[in-house]
Image (cartoon, rainbow, N blue to C red):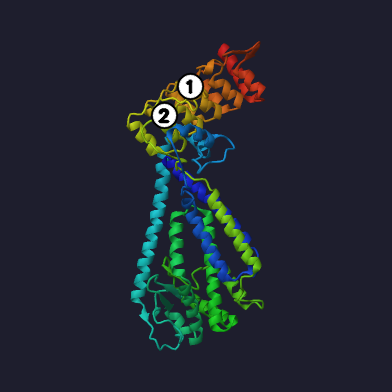
Amino acid sequence: MEGLQWVAEIAFRHLWQSALILALVTGLLLRKEKWSAEHRSWIWAICVMLMGMMPFVTLIPTPQLELSPEQIPAVSRMVDEPGALPLTSYSYNASLIEPIQETIDSTFFDHRILFWIILAVWGVVTIRASMQIFFAWQRTHELRLNAEPVSKDAPFLPESWPGKVLVAVSNEINGPMAIGVLEPCVLLPKSLTETLSPEQLKHVLAHELAHIKRGDLIGALAQRILLAFYWWSPFMRLGCYHLRTEREMACDDRAARMAGSSKNYATSLLDSAEALIVDRRTTTNLMAVGAFENGNGNFFTRRIKRLINANYRDDLKLGQPQMMGLTGATAVIALLFVLSPRTAFSAVEIEDKGFCCANLIEAIYTQDHELKKELIAKGGDVNCTSDDEGTPLIVAARKGDAALVAWLIAEGADVNLQIGGEGSPLYAAAKRGHLSIVKKLLAAGADPNSVIDGDDTALMVAARKGNFSVVKYLVKYDADIDFVLWDGDEKVTAISEAKRKGHSGIAYFLKERQKGNRG
């Protein structure tokens, strides 16, 4: 697969797979009151992880069959036949990118330039986001070094506080936060230690300790890495948003249990927010999680209302409906993994990699670019023929792989070589409406008026199939509108074929061009 196709394939996979996963999780959690925030946060964490991994995981090939070279053509036909069940894995569907490729070709724009532009834009933004992660770690490390550690007998430090988690006070931060993936630490703003009571500080510390115990520091780092790679994806941003909100509410629940009352804990949160508003200190881009990490005032209000609600519960268990929902969601995800098309992996293994036409055609069918290059480099004939498949160029034109057609032409493929079945590369491309390939073949010297099997032309088959853009381009290259075939006593032309199949627009266009030519 060429570079632009790889980019398009990964992006397309991520978007449609993420849309399905998000829809599935949203439906599963539709009745939020039946799920605890803890459970919801872990479900969203799995959702984000799947959205990031699925486009790459589904490229893993399934077990493959080992076939001899003599069996390859028959297998290739089975894979290529409409409605046939694939033997192992799917080849890349060139039709997904064909409209884009045709638009690019129509403006005489080299798709390789577009690929490098896309790659450059993605790379610049990704590198910038990655550098921000590094600078965030650096800044957070400096804050930790400059913070003043709290003594173990501090009145606001809970007796059950784990000894390996350092607590320190900083005058450079605007909210309590947990930092340190490997060596966890809780930083408290100096303004809070001077304003809140020891009991309220214990509630604040309980929230940050919940982040550490849940492993949220590692999760937050993974989120930032995924967002650095998928910065262009609205689905990834939406999934990460839900994960952040549910993560905060899950830590609220744990802190409320440690506080003994959700209302007391809510009061401590409100007093903390008031003290921090007065402080007006700002700190951004840190490798940290905390009770005030999400600066959205509406979300903070939701958290408080939830905690003081008379129906508040933090101990919801997974009931039978929830377990059934999880089981169903897992089954759908597994089905998504199994049914996702595999890309750029051969559908068969060849015992002998020495050259034969069947090997080269198999490499074209399965888009094994390394194998086809190796076969040609070893002296293989790029114009070899197969009674069943035609020539390698005909196969590439039939499958709609413009990049492969260009490569074969560069390697010396004869654009006018005819064989049974599809006849010629131009005929095969015109029949399927592959405009970009028609353009490449005509530019390379393909004869637009060659008669296939004594009774058909590329213009006639394009008119018959309703491929208007191909018809226009063939006429531009002087395809003969007046060419006549006889089916018994019946006169057959490109115009009559278009009329017979109901393509009145094509018939009208050809008539007008015919009048212009005669005039």
65 or 335, nearer to the observer: 65
Q: Is residue 140 above or below residue 368?
A: below
Q: Amino acid at mark 1?
A: Ile
Category of crowding for the residue at label 2, using alpha-carbon neighbours closer than 10 angstroms: few (below 14), some (14–19), many (at least 20): many
Q: Residue at x 57, y 67 (%)?
A: 40
Badges 1 and 2: C-beta atoms under 8 Å apart? no
Picture quarter with the N terminus: top left
Distance between the Cα atoms at labels 1 and 2? 14 Å
89 or 194, nearer to the observer: 89
Could you tell whether 62 is left or right of 141 in the image?
right
Tell me, for residue 419, which label it has, or none.
1
Looking at marks 1 and 2 on the same chain, the residue that comes earlier in the sequence is marked by 2
375 or 103, nearer to the observer: 375
Say what secondary structure mark 1 lies in.
loop
Residue 375 appears anywhere in the view: yes
Toward which corner of the image does residue 345 lie, by quadrant?
A: top left
Picture coordinates of residue 14 (x, y %)?
51, 51
402 or 332, nearer to the observer: 332
Toward which corner of the image does residue 190 lie, by quadrant?
A: bottom left
Q: Residue at x 48, y 32 (%)?
A: 73
User: Pointer 2: what residue?
Assistant: 357
Q: Is residue 122 above or below residue 211?
A: above
Picture quarter with the C terminus: top right
Residue 403 appears anywhere in the view: no
Picture coordinates of residue 224 (x, y %)?
44, 61
Say what secondary structure mark 2 lies in.
helix
Question: Of tags 1 and 2, which is closer to the observer?
Answer: 2
Picture coordinates of residue 318 (x, y %)?
61, 70
Category of crowding for the residue at label 1, using alpha-carbon neighbours closer than 10 angstroms: few (below 14), some (14–19), many (at least 20): some
Q: Is residue 74 above or below residue 37?
A: above
Q: Is residue 490 above or below residue 166?
A: above
